[in-house]
Image: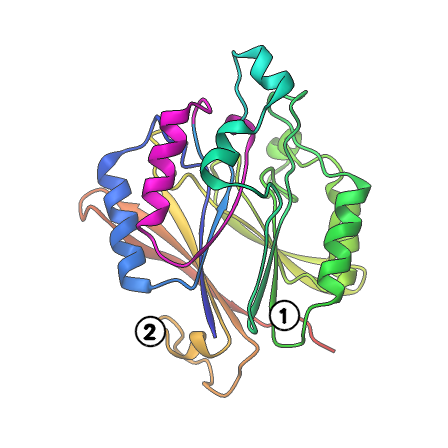
């Protein structure tokens, strides 16, 4: 089965070298099959920042699925923002702004929720929702079905509602109906897992904190997420009590950076069973 490593908001240009090395060490230890990078890869969309970010992810292993965040569009270079807003991203992570990756065990669908006309807020169009729904509807029974956005599709507290993805309610309903299991995001530097019921079906919205940047929130360390799907759950030492024969469980783990240990440590884990007919 599959192990997915989810990073967000690396903000290269503000990265902490010791945390960068700790993520690399975690990836060497965990050997992810898929690496998901959910936007804000750079701080100011500069070529050298994109190059540094690409060199970093190349060290992590796994098939890369990356989407841009609002910080990955030039802020002060108005001509580039208007005429070629994603040039830096595409040069290192292209040619797709909305990549799709499939194996027998996992389907990962990227959605570009940034807009050059917006500095911060994101949105998802009806056409994007329909595209993702069609891809989800073609997924096999055994695939973990993952949708990746940048801005959050749900938030844990009312104070974060202004950061919600525009069009999130329609998108969650449609994607749940089409079979999504997990919607990944970043943007707000707050990690959490929310269980949602949409149209009579369960899905989980999972947010990542900032992986390596110094731009952490007060009291919230750098963090990344790991997903273990199916038989990968049974192989995990964190999966105590999970039957190895239950191949349709997903273990969602949050790993936080411990400054004293200079390493990422397991901070939270929950086992979920995605809905299947």
Which residue does the image show at 31% across and 57% down from the upper left?
Answer: 27
Find disc 1 in the rendering and name its residue. Answer: 274
Q: Tell me if 9 is positioned left or right of 181 in this view.
A: left
Q: Quadrant of the C terminus?
A: bottom right
Q: Is residue 221 visible?
A: no
- Cβ–Cβ under 8 Å for marks 2 and 1: no
Q: Compared to 224, does 10 lie above or below? A: above
Q: Tell me if 148 is positioned left or right of 210 in this view.
A: right
Which residue does the image show at 39% across and 77% down from the upper left?
Answer: 240
Q: Residues within 10 Å of mark 1 (few under 14, many from 20)?
A: some
- Element type at mark 2: loop
Find disc 2 in the rendering and name its residue. Answer: 237
Q: Is residue 53 magenta?
A: yes
Q: Compared to 201, does 60 lie above or below? A: above
Which of the numbered marks, if any, corresponds to residue 160? none
Which residue does the image show at 57% across and 77% down from the upper left?
Answer: 248
Residue 139 x/y as whole percent: 69, 68
Q: Is residue 80 magenta?
A: no
Residue 39 x/y as whole percent: 51, 38
- Spatial distance from mark 2 to mark 1, Cα to Cα? 21 Å
Tell me where the magenta segment starts and ends, as one range.
Answer: 43-72
Residue 263 x/y as whole percent: 23, 50
């Amino acid at each position: 089965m599959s192990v997915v490593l989810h990073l967000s908001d690396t903000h290269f240009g503000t990265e902490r070298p010791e945390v960068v090395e700790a993520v690399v060490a975690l990836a060497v230890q965990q050997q992810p099959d898929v690496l998901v990078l959910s936007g804000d890869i750079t701080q100011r969309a500069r070529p050298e920042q994109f190059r540094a970010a690409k060199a970093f992810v190349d060290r992590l292993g796994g098939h890369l699925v990356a989407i841009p965040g609002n910080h990955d569009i030039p802020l002060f270079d108005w001509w580039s923002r208007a005429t070629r807003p994603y040039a830096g991203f595409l040069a290192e992570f292209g040619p797709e702004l909305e990549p799709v990756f499939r194996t027998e065990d996992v389907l990962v669908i990227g959605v570009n929720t940034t807009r050059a006309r917006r500095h911060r807020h994101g949105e998802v169009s009806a056409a994007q929702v329909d595209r993702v729904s069609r891809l989800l509807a073609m997924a096999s029974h055994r695939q973990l079905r993952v949708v990746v956005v940048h801005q959050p599709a749900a938030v844990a507290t009312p104070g974060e509602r202004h950061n919600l993805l525009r069009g999130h309610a329609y998108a969650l309903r449609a994607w749940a109906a089409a079979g999504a299991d997990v919607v990944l995001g970043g943007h707000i530097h707050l990690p959490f897992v929310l269980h949602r019921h949409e149209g009579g079906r369960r899905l989980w919205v999972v947010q990542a904190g900032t992986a390596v940047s110094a731009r952490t929130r007060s009291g919230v360390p750098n963090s990344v997420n790991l997903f273990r799907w199916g038989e990968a759950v049974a192989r995990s030492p964190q999966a105590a009590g999970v039957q190895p024969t239950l191949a349709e469980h997903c273990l969602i783990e949050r790993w936080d950076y411990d400054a004293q240990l200079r390493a990422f440590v397991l901070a939270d884990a929950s086992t979920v069973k995605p809905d299947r007919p």
